[in-house]
Amino acid sequence: MKNAKRKEPGNQNLKSTDSCLREFFVDQLKDIYWAEKQILKALPKMKKAATSKELQAAFEDHMTVTQKQVDRLEKSFELLDEKAVAKKCDAMEGILSEGQGIIEETEEGTATRDVGLILAAQKVEHYEISTYGGLAQLARTLGEVKVARLLEETLAEEKETDETLTEIAENDVNYEASEESGDKYPQRRAS
Ligand SMILES: [Fe+2]
């Protein structure tokens, strides 16, 4: 589709303040704003639950990054002349509660728990990648170029975090977990 002729409404003066699409876009920004704030609360718990030093560092690093992403969303609301309001995101609530479930179901100090934490964190990242990718595109369609740039900056960070998590899994955690004794999970072996 690279050569297909695309309309570039961002180049036209389409900064309408009351279109349905704009309303939808702002609503979706509120949704990811809520999600980011919840992620900010979940990350210290994930770091505490992790055993691998690399994974702990990745979660720690992502706390700082996430705070910047929250700030960028607030800046986006400001640019759009909208109030920064968080609106509950059911999808992120589900993904984060699944992550909490992994912590509860796995044993402390095991690589198996780290594998679960990475999987949970990557589900978060993939949700964010699809959201920011779509929203950045919508921002361009709406002619909100500055907002689009902010969203694209965050999108790049989410992709980077996802790659870091893959590296940690591939380089140590997955193998270590495969070597872990199964008798830590007697109830699973019995079923
Ligand atoms: Fe994020």
Image (tube, grey):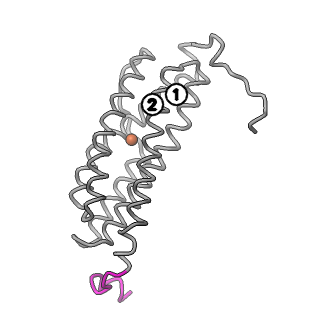
The magenta segment is: 179-191
Q: Give the residue at the far bottom of this rendering.
A: 190
The residue carrying mark 2 is 29
Q: Quadrant of residue 158?
A: top left
Q: Label 2 near label 1: C-beta < 8 Å? A: yes
Q: How many marks?
A: 2
- Inspect the magenta stretch and tell me whether residue 163 lies in it: no
Task: Give the image location of residue 185, x and y in percent.
Answer: 30, 82
Q: 62 or 137: which is nearer to us?
A: 62
Task: Give the image location of residue 27, x and y in percent.
Answer: 47, 29
Task: Give the image location of residue 60, x and y in percent.
Answer: 26, 48
Q: Amino acid at mark 1?
A: Phe
In the picture, the quarter occupied by the N terminus is: top right
Is residue 120 found left or right of 127 in the rendered image?
A: left
Q: SS class of the residue under badge 2?
A: helix
Q: Amino acid at mark 2?
A: Leu
